[in-house]
Structures are given as C-alpha cells and as structure tokens.
Image: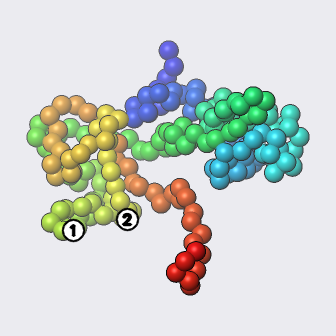
Amino acid sequence: MSKKCNDIFPQIDHCERIKILNALGSETRVKIIQIICEGNIHVSELARTIGLSVPVTSKHVNLLEEAGLIKREIYGKSHVLSINNRNLYAALDIFAPKKKLKVKKGTTLLEALEQVAVVEVQNVKGYNNIVSTNGEEGFFVYEVDGEFSNKTVQEYTFEKDVTIAWKKLEPITKLKLEVNVNEEKDY
C-alpha cells in the first residue's frame, strides 16, 4: 500500500508525486512542458523546436508521460502531445502546511479559520468576503473532503470531522489574446 501525501488529492500517491517532481528536475523537460502548454504538438515538431533528436526527445516525453504531466494521442504514426495540468497542481499540494483544529459542532468555517490564521474580511455587496489570509491578499475558495462547497465561509458549519483545503486562486494565464482593432467597421 502506498503512502498518501495529501488527502485532498487521494489519486496522487507518494510514488506518483516523486515521479512528477523528478520529471520536473530537468531543464529540458521543463522546456518541453512550457512548449506543450502553448498548444498540442507532434513529437517530431517538438524535437525540432528544442533542437534534439526525436529519440532523445521521446525519452524525455516518456518520463513526462509516466509522471502524468502530459498526455499522448496517437493518430496513425503521429503522436500528438498535450498538457495534463491536474497532476502538476496536485503534486504541489504536498507543500501546503497542515493544521489540526478542534471545534464545537455548528462552528462556522470563518470562525475556524480565525483560530488558525489572520483573516481579513471585507463586506462586498452585502457579503463578507475573505480578502486576505495571513497577510496574503487574493481570492480564496475551499474544498470539504475534496469537493467544492456552494456555501460561504459564514454559512458552512461543521457537523462532522472533515478536511478543509483552503485555496488561493492564483492568476495563471490560460489563454493570451492578442487583439488587433481595425478602425473600419467591416472586416
């Protein structure tokens, strides 16, 4: 039985995390990930882009694929690679600090958070929103036992033992649009 590093992503066990971190330990493989993040690419085109032979590129690709960081689709003799972000993000969760807390039944999530962190709350359009945790500003969401909740931190109350994953939404660019505006109305 493999050791679990993080209960939030139970599908990513200790050995898989080691594979992911090992795969990211090479500048070439990090460069490959960056290229694939820009869009799906054929193995041969990837090899030309990074200036390596197809066999050497394939070895790097195989390591990334075994780590679950990329996916491969085969169309005849063409191998097309795409990114698998979920495993990349899940591997990083092992670095999140863990805190244990005992609360009374009916305690709100906000009350629990205030016991373990410095939380800044601002009222926005009639709703209290957490805008900072331990001095780090941003937008935050939470999961209860790996599932997102549809309740606010003031509405969610503890009725049983659970694991909360408090997450900051990071501004990760998913798409860049280069927009050219034409002065003419017809284009």
Disc number placed over residue 41 in the picture, else none: none
Residue 66 visible to the viewer: yes
Mark 2 residue crowding within 10 angstroms, few (<14) / some (14–19) / many (20+):
few
Instruction: Return the disc, 1 or 2, that comes first in the chain's sequence.
Output: 1
Task: Name the residue carrying label 1.
Answer: 124
Q: Amino acid at mark 2?
A: Glu
Label 1 vs label 2: CA separation? 15 Å
Q: Position of residue 121 (x, y in %)?
A: 23, 64
Compare residues 111 and 89 and report the one nearer the observer: 89
Secondary structure of residue under mark 2: strand
Q: Tell me the quadrant of the picture where the C terminus can be found.
A: bottom right
85 relative to 167 in the view: left or right: right
Between 134 and 162, the residue placed more toward the observer is 162
Residue 49: x percent and y percent? 81, 51
Q: Residue at x 44, y 45 (%)?
A: 96
Residue type indicated by callout 1: Val
| Left or right side of 170 for 145 | left
Residue depicted at 18% across the width and 45% down the height: 156
Which residue was labeled with disc 2? 137
Element type where label 1 sits in the image: strand
Front position among marks 1 and 2: 1
Residue closer to the observer: 121 or 143? 143
